Image (cartoon, rainbow, N blue to C red):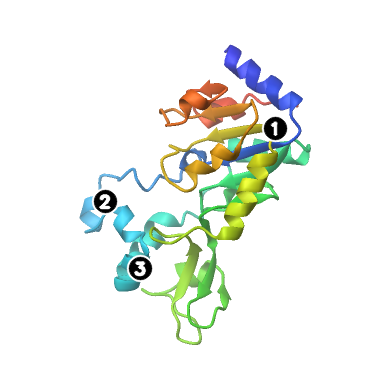
Amino acid sequence: MNEINDFMNWIQDSNHIVFFGGAGVSTESGIPDFRSVDGLYNQQYDYSPETILCHTFFMKKTNEFFRFYKNKMICLEAKPNVTHLKLAELESLGKVKAVITQNIDGLHQMAGSKNVIELHGSVHRNYCMKCGKYHGIESIIYSKDIPTCECGGIIKPDVVLYEEPLKDSIISDAVESITKADMLIVGGTSLSVYPAAGLIEYYKGNKLVLINNSTTPYDKHANLLLKTSLGDVFSRIKNI
């Protein structure tokens, strides 16, 4: 594929690469996209994932929220795949300066990436809504029903739910990183969820790479469009 050769050459020639990734980065580690409802889903839950994962539902039906969250959103057995590992390697070589992710699984950090901007938070961080105390993921997975702090407050995962805004500081970090990028690689995301998807508009360079099996609204803006899996592309990166 000539496109793959172009991709490799661009990486060789770039020194401030930023990667922007979505759920498709982690599906190759066995973490399902929650929008892809499995066959047993309707037998287990009375609401759609988007309904359950909103702030109103969390506040009104907290017990049902945590039943879904613990069963569907926490996948501690998942391991980093080739995309995570290659991005960490490229960072260690001084090529990749930042990884911006919509995922909450922490796999980029597990692979060794240091500068990871988590737009939607992380399952590994949780805090008490009453006293603000930090709690690890064990407080969630080992709790019965609703996890609670010693003070009696509900422990909330540090993840951005529907109806909740992204943190201003996180958006600022992402915008600054993308603005400085000489190459922007976007992969595993439909680019349909805002404001996250709109962040790529801050890239003003000429090496915008989109890697996705399906069509996105930004395909026509890409300088290089790779209609394949992330694993197929990143597994070819050698001897950078």
Q: Which quarter of the figure is the C terminus placed in?
A: top right
Which of marks 3 and 2 precedes in the sequence? 2
Q: Which quarter of the figure is the N terminus placed in?
A: top right
Q: Nearer the viewer, residue 85 or 151?
A: 151
Q: Give neighbour class at mark 2: few <14, some 14-19, many 20+ (Cα, 10 Å).
A: few
Q: Is residue 52 left or right of residue 127?
A: left
Q: Is residue 137 left or right of residue 62?
A: right
Q: Residue 214: percent from the left, percent from the top?
A: 41, 28
- The residue indicated by pointer 2 is 41
Secondary structure beneath dot 2 equals helix
Q: Is residue 4 above or below residue 61?
A: above
Which of marks 2 and 1 precedes in the sequence? 2
Secondary structure beneath dot 1 equals loop
- The residue indicated by pointer 1 is 182
Image quadrant where residue 133 sits: bottom right
- The residue indicated by pointer 3 is 58
Callout 2 touching callout 3 (CB < 8 Å)? no
Q: Residue 153: percent from the left, percent from the top?
A: 45, 82
What residue appears at the point 41 percent right and 28 percent down from the top-left corner?
215
Q: Is residue 182 above or below residue 49?
A: above
Closer to us: mark 1 or mark 2? 1
Q: Is residue 129 visible?
A: yes
